[in-house]
Amino acid sequence: MESAQIEQLLNKYLEGNTSIAEERELKAYFSSNNVALHLLPYKEMFGYFKNQEEIQFTKTLPLQPRKRNVVKWIGVAASFVILFGTALFYMNSNGTNEDLGTYDDPEIALIETQKALEMLSENVSYGVESVAVLQEYNESKKTIFK
Amino acid sequence: MNQQEFLNIISPFKDKVFRIAKRLLVSSEEAEDATQEVLIRLWNKKEGLDKYNSVEALAVTMTKNYCLDQLKSKRASNLKLVHSNYSDNQAGVDKQVEDKDSWSWVEKIMNNLPEQQRLIVQMRDVEEYEFSEIAKALEMNETAVRVALSRARKMIKEKLVEKHNYGISTNRTITK
């Protein structure tokens, strides 16, 4: 295109009266290498506009705000399940502890009871023995402090 | 609407939204955050999207409003700083701008334009939207859009010509 024609178009451009098609013509002219010397400032301008078209948005979009909420609530639900689960487990295990130590057969129960009582009396008599020592101590105290 | 359908709807314009946000906020990171925010807001109201005849126009309007809000709150917090260490803050900003020498001149010039003009140049000269679309997305009338666009284009051109002449004259003094 001739530079006179370009200049005419440029004036129209500066007034804001060019169409998109005409502006594309200008961009094409200024991206070529035979730009008239006095029009060089425009080359920079249109070159910049052309170059700006290539900038891209590269950041990824976190598009699951709702799904994330679901995940959050799953966490809350899971912690409740664990809480109640452990609570129930402890209650149940306490209950079974109470059942332990009972016998269905009375004879075995008798034997076991005897065993337990024997063990108890053994310990009691061991205790009595040590009390006997105390008794002796008491007696000697009495003889001294009378 | 499932995720894939939503992605299909936004894929033609998500880059545009990002570029518009970047034009206003300048920083790529802030623009990424803004784009993410706008797209997620769209996703959250995905059931009502059928009501809009152009989701793209809606996205652009949302981006514009979100970014302008961001800039407003940023300015509000900057004003507080101005009282305590005005000169320090200023120097930091200047240096930041100079450090980024990869920025082209046009970008620097555009960053000095009013936000509305920046948006319009971005939407017309980069994204190639029709005037009617720009007017709708920015809630302006078409004539106002044309006037603002014309002002912005002239300003960019003027600054570039200035810089160009300056460049030539300094080259001459160097060679002399």
Image (cartoon, coloured by chain):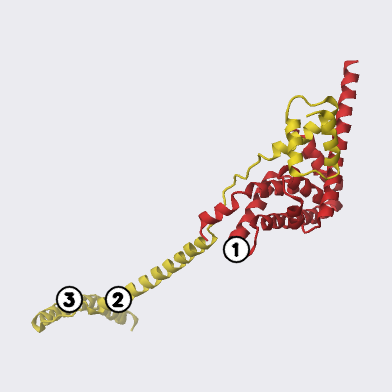
Chain colours: A yellow, B red
Quadrant housing the C terminus of chain B: top right
Which residue does the numbered mark 1 point to in the structure image?
B50
Q: Is residue B43 above or below residue B97?
A: below
**What is the secondary structure assignment of the residue under circle 2?**
helix
CB under 8 Å between discs 2 and 3: no
Tell me the number on the disc at residue A119: 3
Q: Position of residue B154 (x, y in %)?
A: 86, 41
The residue shown at (79%, 35%) is B105
**What is the secondary structure assignment of the residue under circle 3?**
helix
Few, some or many C-alpha atoms within 10 Å of disc 1 (few <14, some 14-19, many ≥20)?
few
CA separation, marks 1 and 3?
87 Å
The residue shown at (51%, 60%) is A68
Nearer to the camera, B105 or A115: B105
Few, some or many C-alpha atoms within 10 Å of disc 3 (few <14, some 14-19, many ≥20)?
few
Few, some or many C-alpha atoms within 10 Å of disc 2 (few <14, some 14-19, many ≥20)?
few
Q: Chain of mark 1?
A: B
Which residue does the numbered mark 2 point to in the structure image?
A92
